[in-house]
Image (cartoon, grey):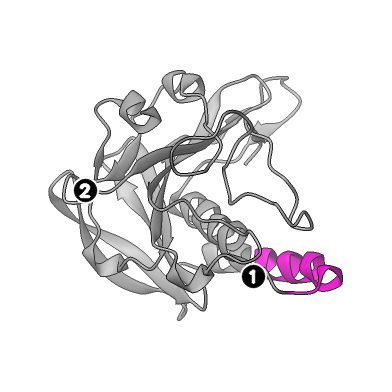
Amino acid sequence: MDTTSRVEEKGPDDPGAAGAGEATGARDGFGTRRVEVDGYLMASFPWYGLDEAFSGPRWLMEVGTGSDGTVEHGSTGHGEPPTLKVGADHDKQRFAVVVTVPNRPLRASPDGAGVLEATSVSSAAWLAGSGLLTSTWPARMERALRDDWLEQQTAAAWELADDLEGPSWSMLTLPVDGVPTPFRHRRTEYGWVLAGSARESVHIGAYGRGMSAYGVGFSVIKDITEYDA
């Protein structure tokens, strides 16, 4: 996907690196950097999050945009924002992130020099899989090994997203706007990943840790500014 992030993240070698999607700006009550809601409001598609059965904190993460500024995807967080800070008890982290990707066909690039690939459930699976990695990579790993580990795991996440019919994925039915919907599901050492579709307009990816993937449900977010509260 030809996208650029609207947030700036510290690299994994920074001992004070934030979790995935933690942007620059003032810190909120959860100790994470606030993300502006403006990018979310520019999207031409509906955003999804956990449904009303989830009663915990909700927070914005990031949006990805194309070279022309079009919003291509974005993520919303639920629970305790993940952190990679040294000294944090990563095994006790409890969060779920929902990724929304609009359903778009093969189309010309903004500059007319090529084409952009069509989005699919695999797009959502890839964004969710890579998001889990950047939120949960081993904080105690030697710095010299981190880049190699992330590169290898990211490549593996890409291959898995491109093979949703493969043995690494199982089927799981979860509610989307109250309607039972099939999702692809896989577990890793660091958490879980889900990918499916909502209506005809968007694909949904999700990843989390400390919360059961079997107990989540999704619904369209009626007011995205509530996540910025």
**Residue pictured at 53% horizontal, 27% vertical:** 71
Judged left or right of residue 14, residue 222 is left
- The stretch of residues the image draws in magenta is 141-155
In the rendering, which numbered label is found on residue 66?
Answer: none
Give the image location of residue 153, x and y in percent. Answer: 67, 69
Q: Amino acid at mark 2?
A: Ser
Extreme-right residue of the structure = 144
Secondary structure at numbered mark 2: loop
Residue 165 in view, yes or no: no
The quadrant in which residue 194 appears is: bottom left
Reading the image, the residue beneath label 1 is: 156
The residue lying at 63 percent from left, 49 percent from top is 18
Q: Is residue 144 left or right of residue 40?
A: right
Vertical relation: 73 (above or below) 188: above
Q: Is residue 182 left or right of residue 202?
A: left
Question: Which of the 4 quarters of the picture holds residue 8?
Answer: top right
Q: CA distance from mark 1 to mark 2?
A: 34 Å
User: Looking at this view, is 46 or 38 the one in front?
Assistant: 38
